[in-house]
C-alpha cells in the first residue's frame, strides 16, 4: 500500500521552479490517486477458502465481482494515506498561490521587461504598412506564470480527487459524501486533536 507523499520544503524558489512543483504533484498523484484501485485492493483480506475452479464457469460482472473492503481498513487508508496526500498537495498549492500574489523582488527578468516596455512605447509604426505592429506580447512576470500554473494544477487536483473519491466510494461505501466534506471533516478532526 502507498504511503502519503512527504511535503517538500516550501520556498519561493521551489514554487518558481515549475519542474519541481509539477514533479512533486505528479509523483504524489501517481503514488496515491493514479493507483487507487491497487491501493484499495491491497486492503482486501486474502481469501481463506482457496481458489474455487467453479468460480470461472460463469462470467461475473465487474461490480458484482468486487468485494467491499473492511470499513476500518478504508477509514484508516483515507485518514493515513489519502487525506494526508491531498493535504500535502493543498498546502503546496496554497503556499505557491501566496508566492504568486506577493511582490517578487528577485525576478531576474524585471529589467528585460522594463526595457521591452520602454522600447515598445518609443516605437512608431504605420499600421497600414504593418497591421501586426500593434501586437505587443510583453514577457510575463514569474509571479503571473506561477499563478497560471497554480490555477491549472488546482483544476487538475479537483478532477483527480473527484475521480479518486468515486473509486473509494464504490469500494468503501462513502454513502454519497462529497470528497470536499470528507476532507474538511478529517482536517477539523485532526486540528481538534492537537
Image (cartoon, rainbow, N blue to C red):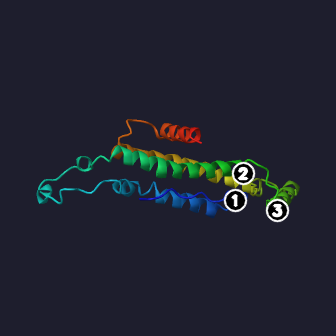
Taking the view exactly as shown, the residue that stands out farthest to the front is 194
Tell me if mark 2 has few (under 14), some (14-19) or many (20+) residues whose alpha carbon lies within 10 angstroms of its own.
Answer: some
- The residue labelled by disc 3 is 112
How far is the residue under mark 2 from the one under mark 3? 21 Å
Tell me if mark 1 has few (under 14), some (14-19) or many (20+) residues whose alpha carbon lies within 10 angstroms of its own.
Answer: many
Tell which of 49 and 1 is nearer to you.
49
Residues at discs 2 and 1 in contact (Cβ within 8 Å): yes
Tell which of 11 and 110 is nearer to you.
11
Query: Residue at point 57% right, 60% down?
Result: 24
How far is the residue under mark 2 from the one under mark 1? 9 Å
Task: Name the element at disc 2.
Answer: helix
Tell which of 99 and 86 is nearer to you.
86
- The residue labelled by disc 2 is 99
- Can you tell which of label 2 and label 3 is closer to the viewer? 2
Q: Earlier in the sequence, mark 1 or mark 3?
A: 1
Task: Name the element at disc 1.
Answer: helix
Q: Quadrant of residue 138?
A: bottom right
Q: Quadrant of the C terminus?
A: top right
Q: How far from the left and from the top, in percent, is residue 179?
A: 47, 41
Q: Quadrant of residue 113?
A: bottom right
Q: How far from the left and from the top, in percent, is residue 165?
A: 43, 45
- Can you tell which of label 1 and label 3 is closer to the viewer? 1
- The residue labelled by disc 1 is 16
Q: Judge from the rendering whether residue 116 lies leftward or rightward of residue 168; answer left or right.
A: right
Tell me if mark 3 has few (under 14), some (14-19) or many (20+) residues whose alpha carbon lies within 10 angstroms of its own.
Answer: few
Tell which of 53 and 155 is nearer to you.
53
Residues at discs 2 and 3 in contact (Cβ within 8 Å): no
Query: Residue at point 62% right, 63% down?
Result: 20
Amino acid at each position: 500500500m502507498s504511503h502519503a507523499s512527504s511535503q517538500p520544503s516550501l520556498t519561493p524558489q521551489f514554487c518558481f521552479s515549475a519542474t519541481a512543483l509539477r514533479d512533486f504533484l505528479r509523483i504524489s498523484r501517481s503514488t496515491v490517486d493514479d493507483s487507487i484501485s491497487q491501493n484499495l485492493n491491497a486492503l482486501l483480506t486474502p481469501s481463506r477458502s482457496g481458489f474455487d475452479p467453479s468460480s470461472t464457469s460463469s462470467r461475473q460482472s465487474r461490480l458484482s465481482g468486487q468485494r467491499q473492503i473492511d470499513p476500518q481498513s478504508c477509514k484508516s487508508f483515507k485518514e493515513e494515506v489519502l487525506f494526508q496526500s491531498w493535504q500535502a498537495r493543498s498546502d503546496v498549492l496554497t503556499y505557491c498561490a501566496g508566492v504568486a500574489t506577493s511582490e517578487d523582488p528577485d525576478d531576474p527578468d524585471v529589467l528585460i521587461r522594463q526595457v521591452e516596455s520602454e522600447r515598445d512605447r518609443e516605437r512608431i509604426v504605420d499600421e497600414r504598412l504593418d497591421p501586426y505592429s500593434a501586437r505587443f506580447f510583453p514577457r510575463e512576470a514569474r509571479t503571473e506564470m506561477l499563478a497560471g500554473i497554480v490555477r491549472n494544477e488546482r483544476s487538475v487536483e479537483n478532477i483527480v480527487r473527484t475521480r479518486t473519491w468515486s473509486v473509494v466510494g464504490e469500494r468503501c461505501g462513502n454513502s454519497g459524501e462529497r470528497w470536499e466534506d470528507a476532507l474538511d471533516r478529517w482536517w477539523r478532526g485532526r486540528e481538534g486533536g492537537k
